[in-house]
Amino acid sequence: MRRKVKSAFAYPIIVLCAATVVITFLVIFIIPIFADVYGKLHVTLPGPTLALITLSNFVRDFWWVILILIIAF
């Protein structure tokens, strides 16, 4: 029974890890590129887009705080 439970949890854990890597890559590398493009266009951005850009800036500037929190958790 334990083996079946472990194997049932293996796939969701792998998917969660892969999704975390992809989202982290997007936040660190891709969103800043779009932020630069939007900044050069001088357009008013919607709230969710501004929140995502702010999140990206926070992660890029304070990655060490996030790392400390993950280790402490």
Image: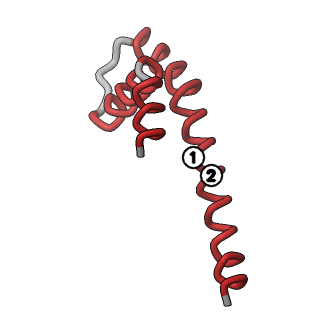
Percent of width and height locating residue 63: 46, 25
Contact (Cβ within 8 Å) of mark 1 with mark 2: yes
Percent of width and height locating residue 58: 38, 24
The CA span between labels 1 and 2 is 5 Å
> Which residue ends up furthest to the front in the rendered image?
72
Residue located 29% across and 22% down the image: 44
Colouring style? secondary structure
Residue located 62% across and 62% down the image: 13
Specify the amino acid type for callout 1: Thr
Label 1 crowding class (10 Å Cα cut-off): few <14, some 14-19, many 20+?
Answer: few
Quarter holding residue 28: top right
> Which residue ends up furthest to the bottom in the rendered image?
1
Mark count: 2
Residue 52, disc = none
Residue located 34% across and 18% down the image: 43
The residue identified by callout 2 is 17
Quarter holding residue 5: bottom right
Percent of width and height locating residue 36: 47, 13
8 to the left or right of 66: right
The N terminus sits in image quarter? bottom right
Specify the amino acid type for callout 2: Cys
Percent of width and height locating residue 72: 41, 40
The residue identified by callout 1 is 20
- At numbered mark 2, what does the secondary structure look like: helix, strand or loop? helix
Toward the viewer: 47 or 28?
28
Toward the viewer: 7 or 45?
7
- At numbered mark 1, what does the secondary structure look like: helix, strand or loop? helix
Label 2 crowding class (10 Å Cα cut-off): few <14, some 14-19, many 20+?
Answer: few
Residue located 40% across and 37% down the image: 69
72 to the left or right of 51: right
